[in-house]
Amino acid sequence: MDTDNHEQAQQSESKDDEHNHKEHDQDESHSEIVANYKYRCKNSASPSSITVALFKFFPGIHEIRAMWVDQMQQGAITLTPNHRIIKF
């Protein structure tokens, strides 16, 4: 008998979780876009930073996860409208 109560509790929790997730989906929309860019500098000096202006043109973007690689190092950073500079 205890097993039946346990199964019912799990089923009830599962239904509640699905219901809450559906409410979350209706309130918010999430999108993922993957883009790759390759920059080549004409002179031998590498830039020390890049300022990302996408937030200005697309105000619905809340964060960008940027990864970069050059001949000497690599890195990753999460950019936001208030923090939009990638430093090398």
Image: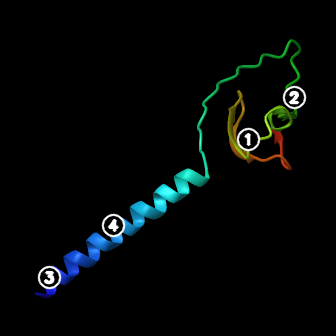
- Reading the image, the residue beneath label 1 is 61
Label 3 environment density (alpha carbons within 10 Å; few <14, some 14–19, many ≥20): few
The quarter of the displayed image where residue 64 is located: top right
Question: Where is mark 3, residue-wise?
Answer: 3
Marks 3 and 4, the one that precedes in the sequence: 3
* N-terminal-most mark, 2 or 1: 2
Q: Nearer the viewer, residue 54 or 18?
A: 18
Mark carried by residue 14: 4
Task: Determine the CA span between mark 2 and mark 4.
Answer: 52 Å
Crowding at dot 2, Cα within 10 Å, few <14 / some 14-19 / many 20+, comes out as: few
**Residue drawn where x is 72% and y is 45% of the image:** 63
The x, y position of residue 51, in whole percent, is 86, 35
Which quadrant would the N terminus be assigned to in this image?
Answer: bottom left
Give the label, 2 or 1, closer to the camera: 1
Residue at the location (85% across, 26% down)?
46
**Which mark, by number, is residue 47?**
2
SS of the residue under disc 4: helix
Mark 4 or mark 1, earlier in chain: 4
